[in-house]
Image (cartoon, rainbow, N blue to C red):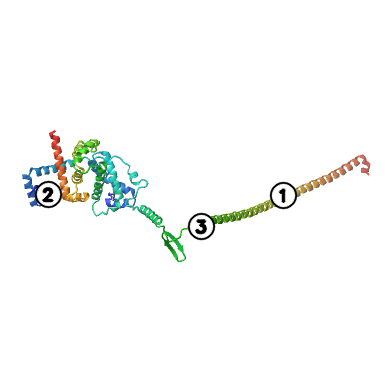
């Protein structure tokens, strides 16, 4: 076995992944070849060194902001928005470059490209523009008039309803006052009547007492009369 | 009942938008990846940058993981791509050739002494790896530290198994040579 072939099997030799025949052949070559033996030692040494590596801790870093910060894509999200914007840009470019015009008619749509349609002159554009402007002015004025008349009618109706409500309130107040006044008058009449009855009763009693006193005096002045 | 979720389960959850699943998956592999990056770059700052780049690339490509092989193999395939890209960007005019080692030392990019928390043995390993061109260093890393087979290494690096072996033996000879020179001095 030559060096080149031995190198091919050297790792398998260390792993024990060779057949007995291959293993023997590699082993025999290693006993004869200093360079291949050194290479085998290098493998052992590096493997030993790598086993001695002490894992270093990862310094703190902000994971959330890196992956879930604003504007970050979801894993595997298809950048369809980019495609849409590219497609839209391409469409606009085609429309501009080829002067594409889409016109609707009774039979459907008509797509025409540059040169198939007459260009509109500047004067026609001006005339159309002034007509549109006049039309819009007329419509605006008509709207203003309509709104003004509506407003006046509304104001009148509002005023009428306010006056009616006020009249009704005054009527109710007057009615209430009349009822109160009537009741007060009845009460006072009743009181006056009672006072008069009291006075009449007192006068009658006074008369009776006076009559009694007069008779008593008469009897004192003429006692014979009494004896007679 | 309270067993850990498998990588595949976590990946499914992460794709479905469960942030926690992705963070658990990161925690499971970040130390291994960081140490990988540390040995490849030779200094902690670059290692952390590279770790973040790798994880970001994995996150973006998570839905392409079909599960027809072990997740670590897929993860380290992406890591190998990102690592090569990272080291190339860091020194854009240099390939993975023999001249790299001297230039790297001159520019002080590979700084094993900068590994603050590493032991002396780590420093010796980093010094030894620092003498290798990045292509050879990558094969040594994948074979001796990640314990991948030559077939897996060839799949990850897009080279044949024989090329991987050739690079590995060249790396071993190179490290031996450097060691002999340093002992002689």
Q: Residues within 10 Å of mark 2 (few under 14, many from 20)?
A: some
Subunit of label 3: A
Q: Are marks 3 and 2 in contact (CB under 8 Å)?
A: no
Decide: is A84 above or below A108: above
Label 1 sits on residue: A177
Q: Secondary structure at mark 1?
A: helix
Label 3 sits on residue: A124
Label 2 sits on residue: A9
Subunit of label 2: A
Quick check: A173 left or right of A215? left
Q: Secondary structure at mark 3?
A: helix
As measured in the structure, the alpha-carbon distance from the residue carrying label 3 to the one carrying label 1 is 79 Å
Question: Which label lies toward us, 3 or 2?
Answer: 3
Of the image marks 1 and 2, the number of the one nearer the N terminus = 2
The lab-note entry on whether marks 3 and 2 share a chain reads: yes
As measured in the structure, the alpha-carbon distance from the residue carrying label 1 to the one carrying label 2 is 127 Å
Question: Which label lies toward us, 1 or 2?
Answer: 2
Q: Secondary structure at mark 2?
A: helix
Of the image marks 3 and 2, the number of the one nearer the N terminus = 2
Image position, residue A128 (x, y; %): 52, 57
The number of discs equals 3
């Amino acid at each position: 076995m030559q060096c080149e072939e031995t190198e091919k099997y050297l790792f398998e030799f260390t792993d024990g992944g060779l057949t007995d025949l291959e293993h023997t052949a590699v082993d025999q070559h290693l006993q004869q070849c200093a360079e291949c033996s050194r290479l085998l030692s290098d493998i052992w040494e590096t493997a030993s060194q790598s086993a001695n590596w002490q894992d270093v801790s990862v310094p703190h870093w902000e994971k959330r902001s890196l992956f879930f910060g604003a504007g970050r894509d979801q894993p595997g999200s298809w950048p369809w928005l980019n495609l849409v914007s590219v497609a839209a840009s391409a469409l606009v470019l085609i429309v501009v470059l080829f002067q594409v015009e889409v016109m609707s008619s009774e039979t459907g749509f008509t797509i025409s490209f540059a040169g198939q349609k007459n260009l509109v002159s500047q004067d026609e554009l001006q005339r159309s523009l002034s007509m549109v402007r006049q039309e819009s002015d007329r419509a605006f004025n008509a709207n203003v008039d309509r709104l003004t008349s509506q407003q006046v009618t509304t104001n009148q109706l509002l005023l009428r309803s306010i006056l009616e409500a006020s009249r009704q309130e005054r009527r109710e107040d007057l009615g209430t006052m009349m009822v109160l006044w009537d009741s007060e008058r009845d009460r006072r009449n009743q009181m006056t009547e009672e006072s008069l009855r009291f006075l009449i009763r007192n006068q009658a009693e006074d008369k009776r007492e006076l009559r009694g006193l007069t008779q008593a005096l008469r009897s004192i002045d003429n006692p014979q009369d009494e004896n007679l | 009942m309270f067993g850990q979720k498998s990588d595949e389960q976590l990946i499914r959850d992460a794709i479905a938008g469960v942030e926690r699943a992705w963070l658990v998956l990161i925690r499971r592999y970040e130390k291994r990846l960081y140490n990988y990056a540390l040995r490849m770059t030779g200094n902690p700052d670059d290692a952390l940058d590279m770790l973040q780049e790798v994880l970001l690339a994995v996150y973006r490509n998570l839905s392409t993981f079909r599960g027809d092989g072990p997740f670590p193999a897929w993860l380290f395939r992406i890591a190998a791509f990102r690592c090569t890209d990272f080291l190339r960007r860091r020194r854009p005019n240099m390939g993975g050739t023999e001249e790299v080692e001297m230039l790297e030392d001159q520019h002080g990019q590979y700084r094993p002494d900068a590994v603050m928390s590493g032991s002396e043995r780590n420093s010796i390993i980093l010094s030894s790896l620092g003498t290798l061109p990045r292509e050879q260093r990558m094969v040594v890393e994948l074979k001796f530290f990640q314990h991948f087979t030559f077939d897996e290494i060839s799949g990850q690096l897009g080279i044949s198994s024989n090329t991987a072996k050739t690079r590995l033996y060249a790396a071993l000879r190179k490290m031996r040579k450097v060691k002999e020179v340093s002992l002689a001095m």
